[in-house]
Amino acid sequence: MLAFAIRRLFEAALVMVTVALIAFTLFRFVGDPVNQMTGQDTPLEDRLKLRQELGLDDPIAVQFGRFLSGAVRFDFGISYQMKQPVTAIIAERFPATLELALVAALFAVALGIPMGVYTGIHRDSWLAKIFLSVSLVGVSLPTFLIGILLIYVFSVKLGLLPSFGRGDVVQIGFWRTGLLTASGLKALIMPAVTLGLFQMTLVTRLVRSEMLEVLRTDYIKFARARGLPERSINFGHALKNTLVPVITVIGLQLGAIIAFAIITETVFQWPGMGLMFIQAVQNADVPIMAAYLLLVAFLFVLINFLVDIIYVRVDPRIRIYGRAA
Amino acid sequence: MTESIAPSSAAAASSQTDRRKPAQRSRLAAFLDSDLLHSFLASKLVVVAALLTALIFGAALLSPLIAPHDPYDLKSLSLLDADTPPAWLAGGDRNFLLGTDDQGRDILSTILYGTRSSLEIGICSVLLAIILGLSLGLWAGYAGGRIDTAIMRIADVQLTFPAILTALLIDGVAMAILKNHTIEGGKFWILVLAIGLSFWVQYARTVRGVTLVERNKEYVEAARLIGIGPFKIMFQHILPNVLGPVLVIATINLALAIITEATLSFLGVGLPPTEPSLGTMIQVGNKYLFSGSWWMVAFPGVTLALLALAVNLLGDWLRDALNPKLR
Amino acid sequence: MRIRAFVVMGALALGLAATPASAKTFRYAFQGDLNALDPYTLNESFTLGALGNVMEGLTKRDKDLKIIPGLAESWEIVDPLKWRFHLRKGVKFHNGEDFTADDVLFSLDRMRSPGSQIKTRAPADMKAVKVDDYTVDFVLTSPNPILNAEWDTWYIFSKKWSEANGATQAQAASATSLNPFALKANGTGPFIVVSHEPGVKTVFKPNPNWWGKKEHNLDEVVFQTIKSDATRVAALLSGDIDMMDPVPVQDIERIKASPNATVLTGPELRTIFLNLDSFRDELLYSNVKGKNPFKDVRVRKAVYQAIDMDAIHNKVMRGMSTNSAILISPLLYARAGEFKRHPYDVAAAKKLLTEAGYPQGFEVELDCPNDRYVNDEAICQAVAQMLSRIDIKVKLNAMPKAKFFEKAGPTKKYDSSFNLLGWTPGSFDSWNILENIIGCRDADGKGGTFNYGGYCNKRIQELNKLILVEADTKKRDEMIYEAFKINHDEVGVIPLHQQALAWGVSKKVKIVQRADNQILFYWATME
């Protein structure tokens, strides 16, 4: 196990460096940061001087080296637009995105599993078909459209929920949470639903298909033959087996959650990392973009590591037959 | 429990009428007799979904023939037609059945042309993702060891770059490399590349997982012993087992590709606005949601939703039908 | 008995009357961010406008953009090379320091520090001389009749405070340490910054010691960014905010029809125009080889006359624009009304094109930002549509502003053949436009840096030099007229329109809308 962990650590570092390299090379193509930082009237000489100061005209290798040496010390420089250290900005925005992602995942699981179980058990009932079709809305419409429709109904028409922002937040140490205030919780509902809808669909169908498979296995048939109550069979035996793939899939869906979070945060003006990233892209704010990508790469590497460990422990086939990757 | 055991009994029933040896029956007859077809016809919902999909695909394909206008021909547009409501409402125009958009394009024609555009992007990017994901997944699963590790790490790198960034970057690289020479339809290929690249990992992972299990089975052992080369083993023997899940993922991905394309437009890096796709229409219509011109987003949105719904239902059915554990 | 009851009731009534009304919090939102609070590091109109509530310059502008006294009570032009400013007495900064001439001199130095983006607020060789604690002389090397035109956004810093807090230099873009001014602000203005989360939320409260006459009744101001147009509209409609800017043109009617909000519209100073590359000998992005069609006046005029600005005004801008024949707003140049657009005439345009040798038309690419000006992409689409009528096939490249300015501007050496641009003269004066937009430049951008098409006319160059130093308004306006006329006749750059401002405002709010789109809530009152 130790050798496995060390090897993975080494690979993780390799992944991060590759991400940094690719990101860096390609950042030349997102647009001109200098124009975004200067006013209309700034004369040409000043613009050129700014480019020099930022080191934008240095050879790529030099820029990259500079960036890496900073990154190792968690120093990603100062944002071109916000004039603040990038690390501070990310630390400020990270809690917002994390809370949103977790609540969205919770929503997806809390609704998805029961729906999946129901449609798995009562395969041909009308309700099951309705559930399936409704859950498909999650994958049929773009996130920004779903978000804006929700805002239209619940904020504009009904006035029940806030149309944007995070509400009041409580500061605990460096973490700002919206979970402890009424307005914070209300503000969390629509974005979490919008973000989690896609995952909910996935979970529903996954649970459903796993349930369908499991319910046909021999041991379930035996349990029934023995006279165990349906409830115990469905939840005690069948459901347990579906949970592992569900959890691993959700973990692996982290990428989708983060990608969709960018849109959700834009629609709801949620002050998280996704919104920060989009603003950085539109302003060609390279320090923020670089730091964001590295952070995301790190998260993936971490999640993959955990998931692979779970896989190895849980699926005996891989352990017995194959080498853990 | 009321699981249906109808398919097998139906099959049993029909095979009673045809006692010829399997090899002698024509392929068509075998198909018509198969479990697949029976389970397909047994579910009305799935049949409807399939018909709907065929309808949409067909309409999109035939769009130049059946569309009342050509929305991509700038010369035929008139700004004065802009923002016309659907024909059955006050202010509507019989010429523009579903109304017009903000530049005067007929919504119905644009939906037809746009669906075609979106489907082209969707199918091409999914194909790209499949080709890439299949090959890499098979290779990783079969070869194992270093190669497996390398490919999985590359997957990690890929996952870090969301589609939006990939699109921006590829766009920039393309512009830099090509300089003044613009490739006709360049934007199209950039989008296909960007979306395809963001999807291949799913296929690769799934295929790798299956390959990992399959490659240790006896039939693969046997093939290797006989001396069949690795490529042949991968593509002729393992691949068929992998197609089922791949197909299912593909159906989900098709709708997702179209939605991603809409999202990229929302973020400013989609197709040229003069040749809108379904996704672009939704993105533009989104701006008019509150102002009362609901038709600009409603009709394309409904089309996309129906397409996604139909394709996903088909995918679901296919997965159930192909899954041997459900027979 | 009755008297006592009367007294008690009276006291009660007084007590009720004396109960303070609930705190008036003005919440507003803008599509962009308020990032750093140091007004010298980012020369961006929204930031400067927001900070205009907190900090002040020697002069200010009133509701009609006329220059009025600010931190300087009065000034006189002693001689063409010396301006004397008399500073206001008794003004204190938010942290308690007194405002004196030392602060003015300090601010001038700071404004010229390497990291400053507003160096052009004053001539580079201007010197400031302290005459006494409340009098400053500005000494010039050549006359400049509009010296203080941009001083309403050159905010004065407190020397003592800046030195005590290590903020004597505007933060350089490449700085590795944080300038305290990025997150705090210390000014003399009617509001104080209470808290600031860049890109998210900023909270202001009134300055009880402000020197001026209070024209607002607010207790607190909260600013938030809302990027998404639709979300911003929803927030206003649902009452989550009291004011927002901008309102997308298609949502104006909807908001006007709503029960608790309305739309404040008015002219804006920004002119939108089209640049055609007349600099190169061969266009980069066209199918015409060996020559440049845009070098021919007839071709440029054909493009001009093929564009139906009335249709764009009605259908694309929904009435929220003023078609313009010159590159400046009529609010800023008295004689603007003497110019009339060349008529929209497709037949005449086709004829001109044929005469110029392009009877079959030609192909060209149009570059356009899609997130910078009001309906920029839609305008470009309409232009593309209209040019196809005279057989100029336009391929439209819409892109985000960071990419657009990089491509079409000096960074990539004006890598564009045809593009859309917008401009507000920072000094509210024509010279700024004549120099930056139609002033000659070289291939690298030295000269008229924002002359994306590279149009050049020697006479305009001459006039620009004279206009800069001419003190007589009538003579100056005459020269400006001549310069604009040359551009009009030669169709160097094609003006389209001035876009209009649209602020969504709650019915409970009254606020002044200034044509430069600065949101000054010290002129706002709430019910």
Image (cartoon, coloured by chain):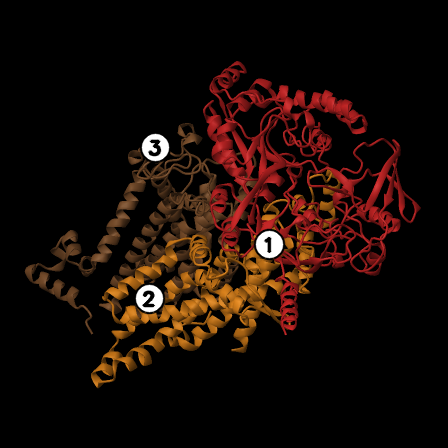
Residue A142 image offset from top left, x and y in percent: 42, 53
Residue C452: quarter of image: top right
Mark 1 chain: C
Q: Judge depth for marks 3 and 2 and give the one in front.
A: 3
Name the amino acid type tagged 3.
Answer: His
Alpha carbon separation for disc pair 1 and 3: 53 Å
Mark 3 element type: loop
Supply the letter of whichever chain is brown.
B
Circle on res. B220: 2
Mark 2 chain: B
Circle on res. A131: none
Alpha carbon separation for disc pair 3 and 2: 57 Å
Residue C61 image offset from top left, x and y in percent: 73, 41
Residue C257 image offset from top left, x and y in percent: 47, 45
Answer few, some or many: residues within 10 Å of disc 1's Cα (few below 14, many 20 plus, some between 14 and 19).
Answer: few
**Residue drawn at x 17%, y 53% as measured from the top left:** B27
C198 or C289, which is in the foreground?
Answer: C198
**Residue drawn at x 34%, y 53% as measured from the top left:** B308
Supply the letter of whichever chain is orange.
A
In the picture, measured across the screen, residue A175 lies left or right of residue B202, that is: right
B236 or C298, which is in the foreground?
Answer: C298
What residue is disc 1 on? Answer: C527
Mark 2 element type: helix
**Residue drawn at x 34%, y 59% as measured from the top left:** A136
Name the amino acid type tagged 1.
Answer: Glu
Q: Judge depth for marks 2 and 1 and give the one in front.
A: 1
What color does chain C have in the rendering? red
Circle on res. B69: 3
Name the amino acid type tagged 2.
Answer: Val
Mark 3 chain: B
Residue C21: quarter of image: bottom right
Q: Quadrant of the N terminus of chain C?
A: bottom right
